[in-house]
Image: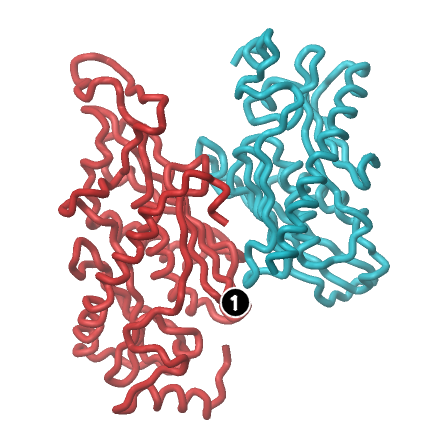
Amino acid sequence: MSHQELLSPEGFRYDGRRCNEQRNFNLELNTHPHAADGSAICSMGNTKVLSLLRGPTDSNDSGLSLSVSIIQPPYAKSDRVQVSKNDRRFAELSLMVQRTLLQSIVQKAYPRTNINIKLTILSADGSILAACVNSATAALVDAGIALYDTVTAITVGIHDISPLIDCNAIEEIDLPYLTIGTISNSKINLLLMESKTPLDKLQKMINLGTEGCIQIRNQLDIAIRKSAIKH
Amino acid sequence: MVLSVAESSYIYDSLTSSNSSRIDARKANQYRPLNANCGFLPNSNGSSRIYNADGIEIITSVKAKVVRTERIADLINVDIDIHGEKDNTTLCQQLTTLIKASIMDSFQFDLLKLTGKYYFQLFIDVSILYLPEDFSASSYTLYSLLSLISMNVYISLKSTKLPFLISSKDDFDVEEEPTFSDDWELSKFLIPQDSKNTFQPPLIFVVGTAGEKAIIDPSLEEEEILEHGICLTWSNSKVTTPIQSLTLSTNNTKALKLSLISEAIKLVKNVAPDVISALDTIASQESDDFNNGF
């Protein structure tokens, strides 16, 4: 994939989207009422993350202990790859999801409590961290855990001067990108960037990302209301 | 699950008495309710999900890859991952071997033949996402998942679609890599749906026995009092190998009477056509929208 093909001169991306166009976003709450206390499945394009939350349960620690584990089955990517259970990258990602979520939970309401979130990446096509955060937030809401507000996340890549929202796997390989998560519409809660970009482009990416997070938040809101009516 | 003496003798006696009844009022050949659907993983050739009211959740994906091989045994790979269990436990390996053996025994390998030199290699990945707490007490009870896993594999194999080959089938003379049509509308089912006489994937049934009685799909409570478990494979409308005895619990195990094997075979012959037709209905309900799976 050459750099040029990722964004055509007419402003279309490889999969036909515009720069500021998200992939098909779908969120469903309470998908596994018997298996978990809170469950949700979040799909952003072909990325699909299922989260199963167990808790709140008793724990011996004084405060709230939130454990997050991310599993990627071998069939998640388009080529079959076996990921070991203690893969470092996923351990790092789960730590990031855990830190992001901890800030949004009303911790004083949960002393000596254990909450366990298991994220399964059923299908991976870019924006894994963002999908994990969105899915886990929805599971927290579904389980009825007290939150200050919902955290939503999205990725933004940059192609020369134009920032591209919600990158897919092909774009993530070639372009520098960041994952941004916001709470209460504009407060940044999560920011991860693993590649190099000129500093002057960063603000542009963050601006588009914040915007995208608000969009996702609205969709999350709709999904929560829909599930509340259903049950 | 630990049952008291009174509880277990009640379950055992009501099962083996002349007016036999199971504690959940099922018939000897009746399954517990199950839900299943298929075709929700965009990155897999075939996928299916099966879940029941206990919360057991199993997802299977079938992925195909083009390989150039002479070894038929390499063409089918099975991998089972159980929530909370390590990959290399005896249980995982035994389940994997049983499922793989049942598929290999009856598989029609020319369905995988692509051209003179190339074959499709299938990767069947089963992940058991959730098991109720009761299961963790004894790993023996996990053998009862065998029939659920095999149903799941059945549905996903039936719903597996492979891309349409546009290069020539005969490549012995010309060095050519197989090329496929970009149009997924042209894709074909791995197992043709219309013709009746092609191969059907095998199904494994778990039958429990107590006294003179054989029951299908034993529940956790029933497993505690069963004297023996038998797994039987049903493929192409007959009972085939592997037929194997299973230890479903360690409490009440006794030697297996030979007559019970034929009893179990009779039971499976009785239920299998219904199970197959139910699973076929699910497999034929194709979802165009990947979001519908959950």
Q: Mark 1 points at which residue?
A: B136
Q: What element carries label 1?
A: helix
Residue at figure coordinates x 67%, y 51% from the top left: A225
**Residue at coordinates 55% horizontally, 61% vertically from top-left?**
A35
Q: Residue at x 59, y 60 (%)?
A: A36
Place residue B176 in its image quadrant.
top left
Quarter holding the C terminus of chain A is bottom right
Q: Which of B69 and A66 is in front in this view?
A: A66
Residue A20, image x, y percentages: 67, 22
x then y, percent, for residue B72:
23, 37
Name the tint of chain B in the rendering.
red
B15 or B228, nearer to the observer: B15
Q: How is the image coloured?
A: by chain
B234 left or right, relative to B226: left
Q: Position of residue B126 (x, y in %)?
A: 42, 49
Depth check, front residue: B228 or A147: A147
Q: In this view, does B74 lie above or below A162?
A: below
Q: Is residue A102 left or right of residue B198?
A: right
Residue farthest top in this picture: A9
- Up the image or down, B116 lies above or below B243; here it is above
Colour given to chain A in the rendered image: cyan
Residue A85 drawn at (x, y percent): 56, 46
| Kind of residue at badge 1 | Ser
